[in-house]
């Protein structure tokens, strides 16, 4: 059985960081009584503990050693081939009523679901070690930070959580000894890694998560999609803030003026790349810095929106990453990185499709089979990932640890659309911006199992991550807007529009700076960039974008910015169909936005 390893017995001083909070101890005892592990390993996140767990993982083939000269302190993990992506069909929101979970979530009744999962967990850790991971999401001094504990029987999970979160003592301290303090209970077991026994279940009313049957990233690093987004969004609505699938970046002009921007793109649609953007030559003196690459927690303060990145590392898409497309990511993953499902070269290096240089003449592919450039199969899985500490990022924003967060000037919604959606446009106001987010669509990617390339509505890039009724979520966004006296401007972007030949019209990556610059200028008080009023929003004309030094023809630019009325008639009909499919939960205000959009096309 792959990845399901026997118990480990660490030397004294490792695995005994038992916290004092009685609520945590009771919960750990309760899970241990069900799963019956051989022993309990209390994690503290220390260097010594990490080294011990890496050594054990290498012994048990959970990790494969890489060439430590080429990629120091880095290791390869191969997940079970049946377990390589998020599983939306097996993901459940278990609110007391189905209505609370809403039309976009799988729902199951909490009582029955607990019973079913406890049944699956019964004796699941016999002969194995149960790890208890304390972690904190957000800068430790942030009033917005949240504490979680994850129980797992996977060393891979422990090693990843140490990179992705602030783990150990810092969380135990923040929680304190109050048994009534707010903290998230996350229980994970690999079981036998079978899709038939794979369930990712959320109990928002209990601030609890149970995940079984998977060993892959988003299904098992419970801090990330499960706590920071699904449970997070549920808590955010109750507590009056926003938990979003957004990157956060800083953009500083040569004059030293800085704006922060948050952007929601669906999975594998460019967040990490945008957050690490390096501006082209034409924008000399501009500096882009990363606050976060996947998740933003935002709150209203003094009429403005402030964002923190709850995470401590990046779990990023590997294929397509190169020194050409994303040099900051490449530098980040040169060392101290866990690789999942990439190819292994004969000299112990990692390789993937889209990496710089020629493909190796021979490699071992992500399944562990021989691979050559003539092989039909891909060497790296399309959803292969790196896990790397954010500290590795040369462009890390200096304010990433700022507890109060960074002020957001612009919010961007973006999808992967071959047609219809222009390169960029700006909403007329907050409510219109919420409508842009609510009606977003994108082609599906390898980040979740199922068909790839199918256009689907993915509101605010949160379709798989909103932990409650999507209609209430839309209303929550509208309500937040009413509390903002200085709201971010809202934009829509699409890096993925294709021309007649099926090729991307826009070069993307670093060149996205040209779009970002227009966006920032639109946010300046004196609106430094101009735009045309179109039926869908404020649209730049070709000369409103700074395109100097870019090798692109006029025709492509015109195509990128074109609003095809026929396509938009279909698009508006698709919006209506989507809203109808939600069964009456969509706020009246958004229905009105659609009517206004349709009316503007008739003017
Ligand atoms: P998750 O981690 O799944 O949430 O994904 P993400 O939104 O962070 O996506 P990421 O930046 O990792 O990009 C996913 C894929 O899109 C990679 O293969 C990139 O090479 C590709 N990509 C990113 N930005 C661009 C762009 O501007 N243009 C084009 N054509 N492709 C891009
Ligand atoms: C995503 O799918 O949006 C990710 C990767 O960021 S995972 O953590 O696996 O969900
Ligand atoms: Mn993501």
Image (tube, rainbow, N blue to C red):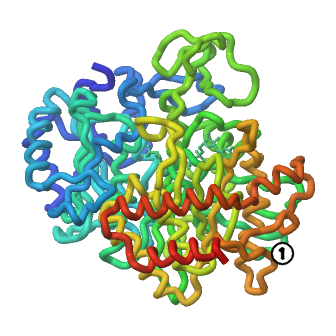
**Which residue appears at 64% of the width and 10% of the height?**
374
Q: Is residue 102 left or right of residue 530?
A: left
Quadrant of the rendered image containing residue 520? bottom right
Vertical side of 202 occupied by 238: above or below? below
* Residue 450 picture location, percent across and down: 41, 35
Label count reads 1
Quadrant of the rendered image containing residue 60? top left
* Residue 196 picture location, percent across and down: 23, 30
**Crowd tier of the residue under label 1, counting other residues whose Cα lies within 10 Å: few below 14, some 14–19, many 20 or above:** few
> Which type of secondary structure does the marked residue at label 1 adopt?
loop
* Residue 508 picture location, percent across and down: 73, 49
* Residue 302 picture location, percent across and down: 52, 89
Disc 1 under 8 Å from ligand 1? The reply is: no
Residue at the outermost front position: 602
Residue 326 visible to an observer of this rendering = yes
Quadrant of the rendered image containing residue 166? bottom left
**Which residue appears at 44% of the width and 43% of the height?**
47
As rendered, which of 152 and 480 lies closer to the eye? 480
Residue at the outermost right position: 549
Quadrant of the frame with the N terminus: top left
Quadrant of the frame with the C terminus: bottom right
**Which residue appears at 84% of the width and 69% of the height?**
544
Q: Is residue 233 left or right of residue 395?
A: left
Residue 48 visible to an observer of this rendering = no
Q: Which residue is mark 1?
A: 255
As rendered, which of 188 and 240 lies closer to the eye? 240
**Which residue appears at 47% of the width and 72% of the height?**
298
Q: Is residue 391 left or right of residue 77?
A: right
As rendered, which of 320 and 285 lies closer to the eye? 320
């Amino acid at each position: 059985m792959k990845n399901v390893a026997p118990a480990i017995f660490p030397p004294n001083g490792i695995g005994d960081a038992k916290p004092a909070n009685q609520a945590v101890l009771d919960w750990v005892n309760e899970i241990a009584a069900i799963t019956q592990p051989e022993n309990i390993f209390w994690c503290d996140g220390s260097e010594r503990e990490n080294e011990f767990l890496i050594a054990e993982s290498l012994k048990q083939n959970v990790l494969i050693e890489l060439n430590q000269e080429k990629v120091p302190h880095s290791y390869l993990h191969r997940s079970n081939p049946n377990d390589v992506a998020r599983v939306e069909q097996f993901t459940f929101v278990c609110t007391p009523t189905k209505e609370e979970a809403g039309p976009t979530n799988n729902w199951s009744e909490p009582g029955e679901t607990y019973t079913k999962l406890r049944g699956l967990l019964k004796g699941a850790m016999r002969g194995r070690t149960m790890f208890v991971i304390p972690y904190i999401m957000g800068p430790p001094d942030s009033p917005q930070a949240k504490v979680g504990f994850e129980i797992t029987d996977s060393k891979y999970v422990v090693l990843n959580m140490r990179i992705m979160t602030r783990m150990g003592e810092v969380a135990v301290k923040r929680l304190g000894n109050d048994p009534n303090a707010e903290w998230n209970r996350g229980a994970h077991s690999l079981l036998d890694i079978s899709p038939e026994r794979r369930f990712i279940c959320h109990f928002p009313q209990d601030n609890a998560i149970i995940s079984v049957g998977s060993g892959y990233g988003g299904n098992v690093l419970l801090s990330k999609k499960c706590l920071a987004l699904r449970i997070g969004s549920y808590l955010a609505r109750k507590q009056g803030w926003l938990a979003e699938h957004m990157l956060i970046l800083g953009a500083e002009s040569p004059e030293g003026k800085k704006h922060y921007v948050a952007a929601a793109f669906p999975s594998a649609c460019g967040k990490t790349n945008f957050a690490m953007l390096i501006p082209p030559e034409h924008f000399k003196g501009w500096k882009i810095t990363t606050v976060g690459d996947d998740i933003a927690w935002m709150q209203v303060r003094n009429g403005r929106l402030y964002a923190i990145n709850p995470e401590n590392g990046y779990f990023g898409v590997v294929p397509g990453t190169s020194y050409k497309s994303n040099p900051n990511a490449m530098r980040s993953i040169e060392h101290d990185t866990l690789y999942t499902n990439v190819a292994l070269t004969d000299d112990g290096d990692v390789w993937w499709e889209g990496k710089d240089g020629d493909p190796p003449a021979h490699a071992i592919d992500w399944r562990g089979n021989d691979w050559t450039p003539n092989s039909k199969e891909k060497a790296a899985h399309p959803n292969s990932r790196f896990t790397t500490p954010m500290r590795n990022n040369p462009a890390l924003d200096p304010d990433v640890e700022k507890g109060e967060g960074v002020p957001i000037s612009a919010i961007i919604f973006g999808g992967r659309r071959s047609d219809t959606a222009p390169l960029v446009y700006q909403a007329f106001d907050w409510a219109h911006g919420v409508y842009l987010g609510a009606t977003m669509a994108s082609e599906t990617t390898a980040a979740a199992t199922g068909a790839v390339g199918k256009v689907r509505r993915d509101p605010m890039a949160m379709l798989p991550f909103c932990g409650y009724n999507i209609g209430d979520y839309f209303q929550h966004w509208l309500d937040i807007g009413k509390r903002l006296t200085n709201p971010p401007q809202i934009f829509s972007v699409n890096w993925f529009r294709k021309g007649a030949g099926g090729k991307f019209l826009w070069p993307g990556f670093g060149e996205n700076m040209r779009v970002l610059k227009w966006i920032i200028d639109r946010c300046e008080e004196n609106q430094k960039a101009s735009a045309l009023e179109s039926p869908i929003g404020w649209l730049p004309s070709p000369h409103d974008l700074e395109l100097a030094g870019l090798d692109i023809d006029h025709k492509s630019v015109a195509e990128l910015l074109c609003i095809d009325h026929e396509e938009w008639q279909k698009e508006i009909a698709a919006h209506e169909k989507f809203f109808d499919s939600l069964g009456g939960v969509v706020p009246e205000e958004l229905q009105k936005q659609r009517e206004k959009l349709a009316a503007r096309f008739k003017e």
